[in-house]
Amino acid sequence: SILRGFGATRVLEARDADDARKMLVQHKIELLLCDHKLPPGGGLEFTRWIRFDPANEFRTIPILIMTTDTRSTIVANARDCGANMVLVKPVSPTSLYDRLVWIAFN
């Protein structure tokens, strides 16, 4: 709903990593918001799969990991897996907007 409030006209939602993989292949995705606890193996494993498979045509997509766990090890692991940013849940419109602007201009 936050993305739609920003003017996004097409927002796809996946319930697990398998659905997300199918969507990445079938659609042009410009941004991925990924939950840290994405089933079955977690958002970091999914991010690693995207980033480190040279055959993935979408491996440069901006990825934001959402989590309630803000320990430095989680943030470092997200970075090491290739996430562009980590967002703390609950995500506010301001924090999401700030990160989207940062990604767009960097």
Image (cartoon, rainbow, N blue to C red):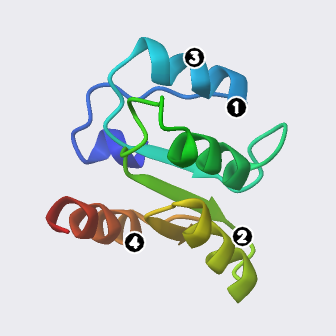
Q: Mark 1 = which residue?
A: 17
Q: Mark 4 = which residue?
A: 95
Residue 54 lies, with reference to residue 80, above or below; the image says above
Q: Nearer the viewer, residue 82 or 104?
A: 82
Given the image, on which type of amino acid does mark 3 rest? Answer: Lys
The label on residue 22 is 3
Q: Local crowd at mark 3 within 10 Å, few (<14), some, or many (≥20)?
A: few
In this picture, residue 48 sits left or right of residue 92: right
Which of the two labelled residues, at mark 2 and mark 1, occupies the earlier sequence position?
Answer: 1
Give residue 31's position: percent from left, percent from top: 37, 43
Which of the two labelled residues, at mark 4 and mark 3, occupies the earlier sequence position?
Answer: 3
Name the residue rendered at 65%, 21% in the picture: 19
Q: Quadrant of the N terminus?
A: top left
**Cα gap from disc 2 to disc 3, whole angstroms:** 26 Å
Given the image, on which type of amino acid does mark 1 rest? Answer: Ala
Give residue 42's position: percent from left, percent from top: 77, 49
Give residue 83's position: percent from left, percent from top: 51, 61
Which dot, 2 or 3, sits closer to the camera? 3
* Helix, strand or loop for disc 3: helix
Q: Mark 2 = which residue?
A: 68
Which of the two labelled residues, at mark 1 and mark 3, occupies the earlier sequence position?
Answer: 1
**Cα gap from disc 4 to disc 3, whole angstroms:** 28 Å
**Label 2 with label 3: CB-CB less than 8 Å:** no
